[in-house]
Amino acid sequence: MGLPNVSGDFSSEMDVDAFRRLFPLRFYERHLVESIRPDARPLGRARDTTLALGAVTSTDGSALAKIGLTTMLAAIKMEVMTPSIETPDEGCIAIDFHMPPICSPLVRPGRPAEAEPVVSKQLCDTILSSGMINMKELSLISGKAAWMAYLDIYCLDADGALFDAALLSAVAAFSHLQIPVVSMNDDGRVVIISEEHQEGKDPVNKEKRKLTLSSIPFSLTSILHKKYILADPTAEEESIMDTLVTVVLDSSGRLVSLYKPGGTVLAYTSAIQDCIALTRQRVKELRNILDEAVSGMEVD
Amino acid sequence: MEYVSPEGLRLDGRRPMEMRQIRGEIGAVAKADGSAVFEMGNTKVIAAVYGPREVQNRSQQMNDQALVRCEYSMANFSTGDRMRKPKGDRRSTEISLVIRQTMEACILTHLLPRSQIDIFVQVLQADGGTRSACINAATLALADAGIPMRDLVTSCSAGYLNSTALLDLNYVEDSAGGPDVTVGFLPKLDKVTLLQMDAKLPLDIFENVMQLATEGCKAVANYIREILLENTKQLESRRGL
């Protein structure tokens, strides 16, 4: 196929699978020259993405997001707490990302995966700084009671682009979230009342409501390799090519976050701008998918 | 509190000898060698098997058989109130041990010396009977991974409330404080591999309850066999046989 013979080109004599395992970089470069990847995707295209809202019925909001084979399950549980003195009118969000050993052969029980705290921190920073959620909406009684939303994201299958799938599932879970009804009990404390026990206690908030989400963040991770930019890498691609760039844009096209943690490839501004352009396209796709999933739930 | 109404209906409308609806699916986790999702009513569990692969801790390697490891963990949101410590607490460690010993008894470990088989179980929704759902999911996942076993291991629980033997307790019935008998059963060999009970029961009633749980296990085994047969047919058609 036009590549120079480097001390014996074994590819013609060897099984494709063996070549893929022994010389992964050459295997990929063979494909990149033709502007295609082994799973037949063009370089700028992301994998098939699906969203299912309300995957876990016992929680206040949940979503299952799949990008290709990468699967993330996000669920939100609300608890009542006393707000801090500096911000008596605001609630709080706690975000946690977990990679249980089922998701990948590289995760050992008892030892958290390397990617786990990194993605956890990235998610926390992105969601809180994007301003998607107005903390004042999480307040109940000023100075006395406010909501604490615990968002837990579990990776059920790790096949690359973990941050993208996790952010998508988090955003979808917040879109699905319904704040439960509460009332004051006899000790003067605010408790969540379940649907069967509404006997005459005055609810503090009248009905279940959803949060208003403004400027929803969406992301795309790309790999830079020589002069190629590969959008939405799989785990195999991430393991052989190490320069990742994650761009997060919000729904109005503003840049929320840009993350390039080192890597062997040093990028010119033009490469970064190409990544941002790819992300812009992807944001349109993801917005459609999210809107379809949300309207699908509302029909029920 | 009345767990069985005078007409003979339980809190969720089931008859005393009726199991909850079960659903199993193979191949949920693509990265794993074998995986399965198993649901018993509202209890939903996902199991993944990695192996046989190289032993990670050389000092634990056994020269004549495979090392079986198991980890049970519950998602933070799986129970009614959010859990603070989903694994490493005493209950999770105990259940991990129980599942490991149950599955180890029926895996033909001598066929895979110097290797390691990892069984990971994650509870996504807990509504009673998590132990049984985990064992059933682990059996499906091991079969999907192609690991040689003596027989399928199926599990079901039964209890005794309001003087009636009840099959497949949910969380409310389980926390009622009555006895809870969990049975792990090998259907073809007709042998019991796991038997656990807490609270007190007179011996003749215990035999009754255990028999009921064993019947539940046989019903689960039939269902699991159907799923595996269906899965094999699909594999056959995909390979063009």
Image (cartoon, coloured by chain):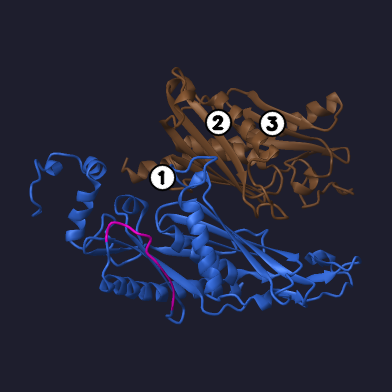
Chain colours: A blue, B brown
**Secondary element at tag 1:** helix
Q: How many residues crowd around disc 3 within 10 Å: few (fewer than 14), some, or many (20 or more)?
A: many
Quadrant for the C terminus of chain B, please. Answer: top left
Q: Earlier in the sequence, mark 3 or mark 2?
A: 2
Q: Horizontal and vertical percent for residue B42?
A: 67, 51
Report whether residue B198 is seen: yes
Res. B232 image quadrant: top left
Residue in the foreground of this view, choosing between B120 and A240: A240
> Counting other residues with Cα less than 10 Å from the Cα at mark 1, is it few (<14), some (14-19), or many (20 or more)?
few
**Which residue has dot 1 on it?**
B234
Q: Nearer the viewer, mark 3 or mark 1?
A: 3
Q: Is residue B80 magenta?
A: no
Real-space CA distance between mark 3 and mark 2, rounded to the nearest whole angstrom: 14 Å
Q: Residue furthest right?
A: A186
Q: Amino acid at mark 3?
A: Val
What label does residue B183 carry, if any?
A: 3
Which chain letter goes with mark 2? B
The span picked out in magenta is: A255-265
Disc 2 target residue: B152
Task: Give residue A193's position: percent from left, percent from top.
Answer: 80, 66
In percent of width and height, residue B19 lies at: 70, 43
Residue plotted at (82% across, 49% down): B9
A259 magenta-colored: yes
Amino acid on which the number 1 mark rests in the picture = Gln
Left or right: A127 in relation to A164: right
Q: Position of residue A132 (x, y in %)?
A: 56, 75
Distance, label 3 to label 1, CA atoms, is 32 Å
Q: CA distance from mark 1 to mark 2?
A: 20 Å
Disc 1 is attached to a residue of which chain? B
